[in-house]
Image (cartoon, helix red, strand yellow):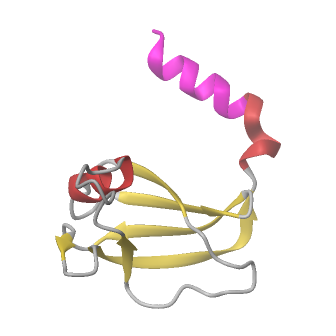
Amino acid sequence: MQYWWVNHKRTPGQRLVGAYLWSAQGRRNSNLNESSRNMARVQPGDLMWLHTDRAVRAIGIALAGATLTDRGWQLPARFMELDVPLQPAAHASALARCFLKSTHP
């Protein structure tokens, strides 16, 4: 299982609609951007943290790999909106300690 951080653009009052994530196919010059490359890397069972407006507001799980449609990448997923959003900035020092432990034995 892999974990993915998704910066999700939406207005604060907007609810998650649909059972998928969507991303544009890539840049106009036909080079894939990092978001497009990552959509292709997500596997079924991977966990996603949906971040918008400075908080993690939902958690999602990939139900299948992404498919490329005529409009862009579509990734089937199931989401659960958090009753209390997680604000990473409020926990920055604890998160930094966790990441430092995982990268430096």
Above or below, comparing residue 95 to residue 100 in the picture: below
Above or below, comparing residue 49 to residue 59 in the picture: above
Range of magenta residues:
94-105
Q: Does residue 69 appear left or right of residue 27 in this picture?
A: left
- Residue 38 placement (x, y as % from top left): 31, 51
Residue extending farthest right:
90
Residue nearer the viewer, 30 or 11: 30
- Residue 68 placement (x, y as % from top left): 18, 72
Q: Main secondary structure of the magenta part?
A: helix
Q: Does residue 61 appear left or right of residue 80 in this picture?
A: left
- Residue 105 placement (x, y as % from top left): 45, 9
- Residue at position x 42%, y 51% from top? 4
Above or below, comparing residue 11 to residue 44 in the picture: below
Q: Does residue 103 appear left or right of residue 25 in this picture?
A: right
95 magenta-colored: yes
93 magenta-colored: no
- Residue at position x 39%, y 59% from top? 47
Q: Does residue 1 appear left or right of residue 87 in this picture?
A: left
- Residue at position x 31%, y 57% from top? 36
Query: Quadrant of residue 44 in the image?
Result: bottom left
Residue extending farthest front:
29
Tally of numbered tags = 0
- Residue at position x 28%, y 74% from top? 72
Residue nearer the viewer, 8 or 44: 8
- Residue 94 placement (x, y as % from top left): 71, 31
Query: Quadrant of residue 100 in the image?
Result: top right
